[in-house]
């Protein structure tokens, strides 16, 4: 099984949708807590669903089960917390939510990308989700686009 990840910030729409098309992504699984902010530009939920369908022939699904809580997000972003603390808190949340049981593996039967806003996966929860599923499910290859 392959899990792809992508962030939209610091990318133009042309770059973002071009990367998805080139990778053959058929579904985007939006794992952002807040996906309707004006700051999201072309990646606002209502627009993204349209653009993915029209430009990539891909489907859009929002999955808040894979998003951090507002408290975890605020502790890291607003209160300038340590990334290591964020990782610990978010991993504990994934364990508590039992995401490996709650997410159907079949969602990744076609090329699917976990979407978040961070430009790279290094300090983004999409990497943590992909690695957690890889650890729990086994047989998972991760591609950061």
Image (cartoon, rainbow, N blue to C red):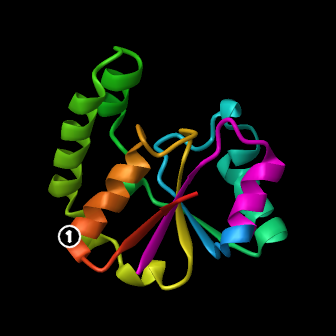
**Residue 26 location (% of width, % of height):** 64, 76
Q: Residue furthest top?
A: 79
Question: In what quadrant of the picture does the N terminus appear?
Answer: bottom left
Residue range corresponding to the magenta coloring: 1-21
Question: In what quadrant of the picture does the C terminus appear?
Answer: bottom right
Task: Left or right? Give the position of 136 relative to 33.
Answer: left
Residue 63 inside the magenta-drawn segment: no
Task: Left or right? Give the position of 13 relative to 4.
Answer: right
Residue occupying the point 34% across, 72% down: 103
Whether 123 is drawn above or below 29: the answer is above
Residue occupying the point 26% across, 43% down: 90
**Residue 24 location (% of width, % of height):** 67, 75
Look at the numbered disc 1 and give the secondary structure of its residue: helix
**Is the residue marked by circle 1 packed among few (<14), some (14-19), or many (20+) residues within 10 Å?**
few
The foreground one among 83 and 94 is 83
Residue at numbered disc 1: 136
Residue occupying the point 24% across, 77% down: 138
Residue occupying the point 49% across, 46% down: 32
């Amino acid at each position: 099984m392959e899990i792809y990840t992508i962030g939209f910030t610091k990318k133009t729409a042309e770059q973002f949708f071009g990367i998805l098309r080139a990778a053959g992504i058929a579904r985007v699984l939006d794992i952002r807590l807040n996906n309707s902010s004006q700051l999201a530009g072309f990646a606002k939920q209502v627009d993204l669903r349209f653009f993915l369908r029209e430009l990539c022939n891909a489907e859009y699904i929002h999955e808040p089960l894979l998003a951090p809580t507002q408290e975890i997000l605020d502790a890291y972003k607003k209160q300038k917390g340590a990334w290591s603390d964020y990782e610990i808190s978010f991993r504990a949340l994934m364990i508590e939510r039992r995401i490996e049981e709650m997410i159907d593996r079949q969602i990744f039967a076609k090329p699917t990308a976990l979407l978040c806003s961070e430009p790279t996966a290094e300090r983004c929860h999409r990497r943590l989700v992909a690695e957690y599923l890889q650890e729990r499910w086994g047989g998972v290859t991760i591609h950061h686009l």
